[in-house]
Amino acid sequence: MIAEAGLAALWLAAGLALLQFVLMIVALRTPVEVARTMRAVAVLQGALTLIAFAALLIVFARTDLSVALVVENSHSAKPFVYKVAGAWGNHEGSMLMWVTILAAAGACLGLLSRRTGERTLIAALGAQAALALGFYAFLLIASNPFARLNPAPLEGHGLNPLLQDPGLAFHPPTLYLGYVGLSIAFSIAVGALVTGEVDSRLGRAMRPWVLAAWILLTLGITAGSYWAYYELGWGGYWFWDPVENASLMPWLAATALLHSVSVLAARGALKAWTMMLAVIAFSMSMVGTFLVRSGVLTSVHAFAIDPERGTFLLALLAIYVGAAFALFAWRGASLKEGAPFELVSRETGLVINNLLLSVILGIVFLGTLYPLFVEGLSGEKLSVGAPYFNAVAGPLALILAMLVGIGPLLAWRRETRPVFGKLKIPLLIGATALAITIILAPAIGILPRLGLTVAAYLAGASLLPLIGRNPLRAPLATWGMTVAHFGIAVAIAGMAANGAFTSERLAVARPGETLSVGPWLVQLEEVTPTAGKNWTAMEGELRATRGQGPVTLKPQTRYFTDPPTETNEAAIDTFWNGQLYTVIGKPDEAGGWQLRLWWKPFVTLIWAGGALIALGGALALLGRLWRRRRGEHDWRRRYV
Amino acid sequence: MSRAVRFAPLLLLALIIATLVWRLAKPVDTTVHSTLGGKPVPAFALPAALPTKPGLSSTDLAGGKPRLVNVFASWCVPCITEVKVLETLRNDGVLVDGIAVRDRPEDLADFLQQNGDPYERIGSDPQSGVQIALGSSGVPESFVVDGKGVIRYQHIGPIETTDVPMILAKLEAAK
């Protein structure tokens, strides 16, 4: 019954989405009072999808083997948390989560939106309903998560062991909240293009939604990066895999949008550009979903590949993005230029930020789809990997990071003060870092060296907006910006340190033997069998020392039976100045074991930086919402 | 904003969608093709896989007549049906040689006894070294090699009965 209830809730929600869309069309033709009704319909629609999603969680929690999806992706012997999280560890379940978030985002818009003009809100809710309709159709026609299986088998097939990890409980939901949360900005932009009400008021209404989605997307990507790092046992934090790029592209667009919407909110400028970015950001989310689900690109994330579903998603993508771009082409001419600004001003800084982010986005997009374009034109096969992305996007990212230190110092409209004098100390810090790396580590690569330099400079420069004033009286939004920009410095430092100073050791060791990696001496004590709830494993015991007392690490090779799979569970020990990362592989015939050891100095800064960036976003969001509640409208003096 | 700027995104989108439609219509070919087509086989000398048959070396393949080199293994299930097709080819006068990948002599002898033995020579390739050198990524695969030892054709997957005329034509063309 629960599965049928979930399915019924989905159909009802789809019906409400249709109603919501029709109401918009009626309201835009004849002036009728539908805003309140549409808000209520949007909320109801969100509630119904939440019921459907809860139904899916329940059938997974109970391992209801009469539901086909549970049979294919679950097993009664799986730990409870992975039974529940396994609900979205598959195509249908994750698409239901996608749709649930889409409808819930629409509900939030209906429930919370106070600043958007009424006609624009009506159009935005209509756009959100149109988006939802297509994805309901996709779910109900091509990916029904509640399909039954009769007769029910006695046992399920189990979940891919790589997904049986706490990461599954956290990474997909946050990533999807960010991905799909961007739909609100998309719908508001479409609504504003329909009504032509693109002004600073709209910018202020759109900003919190962009900020919220961006925070979650940042967290989701950071979490995914750390999950891949420890789970796959390759010791890398980013592989430039098409599916990783699929999550990076919306983030780059959202980051650009976050900054341009500030210009719109504060100065009423960059109207057309901001609307375009809002459309592109969510379009990139849809492109990402299409790339992951259709199998057009070869990826390690090849989860649920099905060309028919790909066709369906591509049709949705073409309709929604095509309609939004056509609307832009049609209505864009009516958008008036905003307030003027001079060459040296906050606006110019943000325009440069947007240009650089857009170029990086273009580079990632081109690199991801380049193999397709080339094969389409010449039939030649090739793949694009880290060497391209690092060499092309890396330097641009560093230039952007240099400018991040300057932008926040500039005043809106026109900067007359000599702000560059303030940068003396940060520049000195950067130069010192460069000198130190040249003296102490002459052999490291150019990109890591520049990375360390820029990180040191930006760590100083990012704090300048708080200096020379009472930091406690600075607006929370300024704190948020400072923390986020400082987070960029921290993340770059982590990536550069990892690139420059990682030591790797791959060797065969017999119990009792000692290997060295970086400053560490690692001894393989013994290898013993062990078992968990649904796996058995060979576990190595490693004693690692560097000067002071030893630490023990226990990497495993796990053998799962449902489905039969082998995974490497890396053992990682974190210290203030880095991580010791160990993996045990196969035995050889002479009683030795393959060991992979890495010493990764300061690698944790990468994720700490990501968390700081998200924290900065959260502070800024809190600051904005708090100010709004207190009814302060003196937005001109705010930073960001 | 000029008309061109306003319509540019739409145009770009159409191009991208067209590429993606093309890719969906023509799914990715994930087979690995050898880059040695039209080039001589790499030099190799494999020991005999069975005491009853000679091994295979690259000089054997430059004996003046076109030959069919079959990369196979006794543990390979599609090879069981393929070996029968190879027998009919042999009966048509085709010279068939084998490269047994990661195999054991006793398993190989059983395999040939049960399913048929079309091979003139069988080389043993215990670590897949020659297989990889030939540009073969799996079993079964076959190569048509002309009388000078040049690879003329690579067949990925088992040779089916329906492939026989095509293979005969390739061998004829390699003369």
Image (spheres, coloured by chain):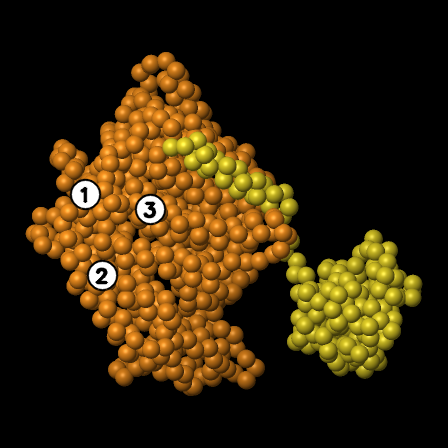
Chain colours: A orange, B yellow
Chain to which the residue tagged by mark 3 belongs: A
Q: Residue A417: x percent and y percent?
A: 13, 50
The answer to whether marks 3 and 2 sit on the same chain is yes
In this view, the residue in front, A307 or A139, is A307
Residue placed under numbered mark 1 in the picture: A414
The tag earlier along the polypeptide, 1 or 3, is: 3
Q: Residue at x 52, y 74 (%)?
A: A586
In this view, the residue in front, A28 or A212, is A28
Chain to which the residue tagged by mark 1 belongs: A
Left or right? Give the position of A462 relative to A31. Answer: left
Q: Residue A328: x percent and y percent?
A: 41, 31
Q: Residue at x 20, y 53 (%)?
A: A482
Chain to which the residue tagged by mark 2 belongs: A
Residue A631, compared with residue B83, is above or below; it is above
Query: In which image quadrant can residue A403 be found?
Result: bottom left
Secondary structure of residue under mark 1: loop
The answer to whether marks 2 and 1 sit on the same chain is yes
Q: Residue A264: x percent and y percent?
A: 27, 36
Numbered mark located on residue A459 in the image: 2
Left or right? Give the position of A616 relative to A189. Answer: left
Which class describes the residues within 10 Å of circle 1: few (<14), some (14-19), or many (20+)?
some
Left or right? Give the position of A337 relative to A18. Answer: left
- Pick the quarter of the image with the N terminus of chain B: top left
Residue placed under numbered mark 3 in the picture: A354
Look at label 3 and name its amino acid: Asn
Label 3, label 2: how far apart the Cα atoms are: 21 Å
Q: Residue at x 55, y 61 (%)?
A: A564
In this view, the residue in front, A354 or A41, is A354
- Pick the quarter of the image with the C terminus of chain B: bottom right
Label 1, label 3: how far apart the Cα atoms are: 19 Å
